[in-house]
Image (spheres, rainbow, N blue to C red):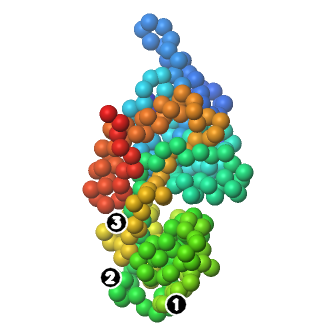
Amino acid sequence: MFKKGLLLSGLALILAGCGGEESGTEESQDSGSNGSEETTVVQVASHLPPMTDVVEIAGDVIEDPYEIELVEVSDNIQYNEALLNEEVDANFAQHEPFMEIFNEERDGNLVALQPIYNAIVGFYSPVYDSMDELEEGAEVAIPSDATNEARALMILDQHGIITLASDVEHTATVEDIEENPHNLKFTHIDLLNLTGAYEDGVELVFNYPTYISSIDLTPEDAVLLEEDEDNTFAIQLVAREDNQDSEEIQAVEEAFTSQEVHDFLMELSEEGHLEPAFEVNE
């Protein structure tokens, strides 16, 4: 069964339909014709479609006695803080490199359990129809967080626009650029504000399909797309070390890798937004 909650500033949780105030996994009593049946509520924090859509579908198919409550957040910080502070049981909003940086910075114990889908990311331009038109000294907007900065730079490296040092991959920064034949000027912008940079006319802008869709663009409109056959940056179901092996988290993982979730992701893959990162177990 699916439930929906809301995470407000200060990480205070408003739990829809729950009588208690305790955070984390909750148990409620559902009266049936033959007595009472315990339901275990598992709270999963997420941020924006299609991530929240996946949580809702998983909530529809999870087996009794478990129930998923979606806890929506408004930025890319709250879902990890809430999980680390045991205010939710899992989250679904990030790739593993992003989670690893969070663990390093916050001495965290978060664990990536299962890749679910890989978003088709790339660069968009309000100026160029193709990279053949790239001009000398063009401005390039890239994410300000470390892992997505590296991801953006790796795409440019993949396509020969820049050359990165050979010993860097998922930790790459602009300081690791060895060759920049177009003398590109890099501007760091918060991930959630990159669509605004496109609207402001920045020549080349990295973005996710989730965010760029707000201005009716899709990966088909991108001038560069990522090549990531290993699903390094796939969006993952994440829990903590202390609860990753619990029965409720195992039930959530099973629901996230269900046929219903896979079918939903395949529909989006036909639109070019993403690719499923798991196969359904028969």
Disc 1 on helix, strand or loop? loop
Most foreground residue, 66 or 21: 66
Mark 1 vs 2: CB contact within 8 A? no
Q: Position of residue 107 (x, y in %)?
A: 72, 51
Lower position in the chain sequence, tag 1 or tag 3: 1
Q: Position of residue 252 (x, y in %)?
A: 48, 34
Cα separation, mark 1 vs mark 2, equals 20 Å
Residue underneath mark 2: 129
Q: Residue at x 50, y 11 (%)?
A: 36
Q: Position of residue 70 (x, y in %)?
A: 50, 40
Residue underneath mark 1: 183
Closer to viewer: mark 1 or mark 3: 1
Most foreground residue, 96 or 20: 96
**Left or right of residue 259, residue 165 in this image:** right
Q: Position of residue 264 (x, y in %)?
A: 32, 46
Disc 2 on helix, strand or loop? loop
Number of numbered discs: 3
As drawn, the label of residue 218 is 3
Q: Residue at x 38, y 70 (%)?
A: 225
Question: Furthest-front residue in view?
Answer: 166
Cα separation, mark 1 vs mark 3, equals 28 Å
Cα separation, mark 3 vs mark 2, equals 14 Å
- Inspect this view and state whether residue 266 appears: yes
- Which amino acid is tagged 3? Thr
- Which amino acid is tagged 2? Asp
- Inspect this view and state whether residue 187 appears: no
Question: Furthest-bottom residue in view?
Answer: 136
